[in-house]
Image (spheres, coloured by chain):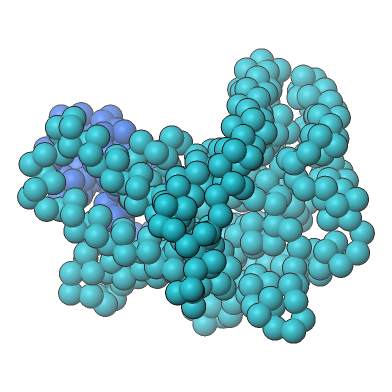
Amino acid sequence: MNLSQYDGYLYMYILLLSFIPAIGLGLFEKKIKYYALIATAVMIYIIMGPGKQLNTLAIFMVWEVALIYIYFWIRSKTDNKWIFRLALLMSTLPLIINKVSPLTKMGVIGFIGISYLSFRTIQIVIETYDGTIKKINLFDMIYFILFFPTLSSGPIDRSRRFEEEINKKIDRSDYVDNYLLVGIKKIFLGVLYKFAIAALIHATFVSKIHADGSLLSPFLYMYAYTLYLFFDFAGYSLIAVGTSYIFGVHAPDNFNKPFISKDIKEFWTRWHISLSRWFGDYIFSRFVLDSMRKKRFKKRAHASHVAQMITMTTMGFWHGITWFYILYGVYHGVLLILTDIFTKSKFHKKYKKKKAYQYLQIFITFNLVCFGMLIFSGFLNNYPFKF
Amino acid sequence: MDIKENVIEIFEEVMDTDEIRDNLDLDVFENEMLDSMGIIEVLLGIEEKMGLSLQPTDLERKDMATANNLISFLETKIG
C-alpha cells in the first residue's frame, strides 16, 4: 500500500483502529510505547509500501543510529569541534543527497518524511556535543525518530522531552483529561480544517485560478493559496498532534493563530512553530551566541541580521533546491531584518500601543505573508520572468 | 555576589527595566519582555558574570520565564 498520511478515508479508518489498543493501554495506566512502536512499523509499511522507499528508510536508520552511537562514544573521549562538525555533516548527508538528487539524472533519492526524521537525528548529534544528552537508549531513540504520528510532516519534537514523557507513568485521570480528550478535540478540529475548510478553498478558489497573464490572477491566488495552505497544514498538524496525544505524547503545537501577527517576527512564533523553533535554536541562536563570544561583529544587531539571513535562506534550501523556495527564504530573511530595524524606530515606539496602529500592522503583515506564500507556491513559475 | 543578585542584574540590563526586582515571579515571556535575541543576551550575561557557558537548548523555556526559575535552574548547575 502507499497511503498518504492523514489523507483519505482508508488511512483515517486504519488510524482509528490503531487508537483502540493505545487508548486501552492508557486507561489501564500501562506504557504505550511498546505497542506504539509496532503500530509505527505497520503505519510506515502502509505509508511507504514495500520497495525503494522502505529500503531507503532502512539504510537511513542504520546510518543515523550507527553514527549517533559512534559519535556518542567519541564525544565521551573528546569534545573536538572538527569531529563534531564532521558528525553533523554525516548526519545531514542523507538530507543533502535527498535535496540534490532531483537535480541529477538519478531522480529523487529518499522517502516520505526524510527531512523531519533528519531534524530529529541532527538534534541528537548537536545535543550530544553540548553534553546535554548523557545516555542513549536504543529502543527509545528509534521510537523517537520514527514515531509515526509525526512521521511525514512533523511537528518536530525534541528527544529529551519525548523520552522523558514516554517513560513516565501517566495515571488514568491524567491520561483521560490531558491526553485522550484533548487529543480527540484536536483531531476533530484538524479534520474540520483539512477535510472541510481547506478542501473547500481548494475546490472553489485555488484550483480555479490560472496564470492567464493578468495581474489579477496572482493577486487572487496569493490569498486563496495562503488560506488553503494554512487550513491544510494546520489541520494536518492538529491531527498529527492529536494522534500523538492519544499515544501518550504531548507533541508540540505547530500553529497558533498566525494571521493575527503584528509583525513577521511574531508570525514565525505562530506559523510552523516547531520548525521555526528548531531553526531558531540550532541555527539562529547558536550562530549569534558564537559570534558574540568571538566578537565577530561590532554590533549585536549585525550578528542578529546575518543570523536571520543565514537561518531563513537555509529554510528556503530545506524546502527544496528550486528558485521559488530559495527566494521565499531570502524574502523572509530580508523581512525579519527590516522588522528588527523598524521595531526599534522612534515612530514604532510612539504608536505601538495604539489599537488602530496595531490593526494596520496586522493588515500589512498579513499581506507580506501572503506575498511570501505566492512566491512559495510556485505559481509565478508560470510567468515569463521565471529563472 | 550570589546567584540571585546576578540574575536580577542580568535581567535588568537585558530588558532595561526595574520591574524584575519587585516581582521575581514576573513571566518575562508572557509580558513580551524577552525575545530570542534577549535570551542570548541573558546567556552571555551568565557567562560573563558567573563563568558558566550555556547553549539556548540547555535550558527549557520555563527555566528562563521568571527570575526565580532562572535562579533555581542556575543553583542546580553551580550550587
Q: Nearer the viewer, residue A46 or A365?
A: A365
The blue chain is B
Q: Nearer the viewer, residue A168 or A371?
A: A371
* Residue A101 position in % (x across, y down): 69, 78
- Asked if residue A90 lies left or right of residue B7, the reply is right
Q: Colour of chain A?
A: cyan
**Coordinates of residue A387 in the picture (x, y in percent):** 49, 78
Question: In the picture provided, is B5 more to the left or to the right than A197?
Answer: left
Percent position of residue A67, x then y: 70, 71
User: Taking A366 as reference, is A256 left or right?
Assistant: right
- Residue plotted at (14% across, 32% down): A354
| Spot occupied by residue A258 in the image (x, y as percentages of width and height) | 42, 40
Q: Quadrant of residue A21?
A: top right
Q: Is residue A266 above or below residue B19?
A: below
Is residue A203 something that shows in the picture? Answer: yes
Residue A96 drawn above or below residue B23: below
Vertical order, A72 against B7 (above or below): below
- Residue for point 63% across, 22% down: A185
Please name the residue shown 84% across and 32% down the image: A13
Q: Nearer the viewer, residue A24 or A379?
A: A379
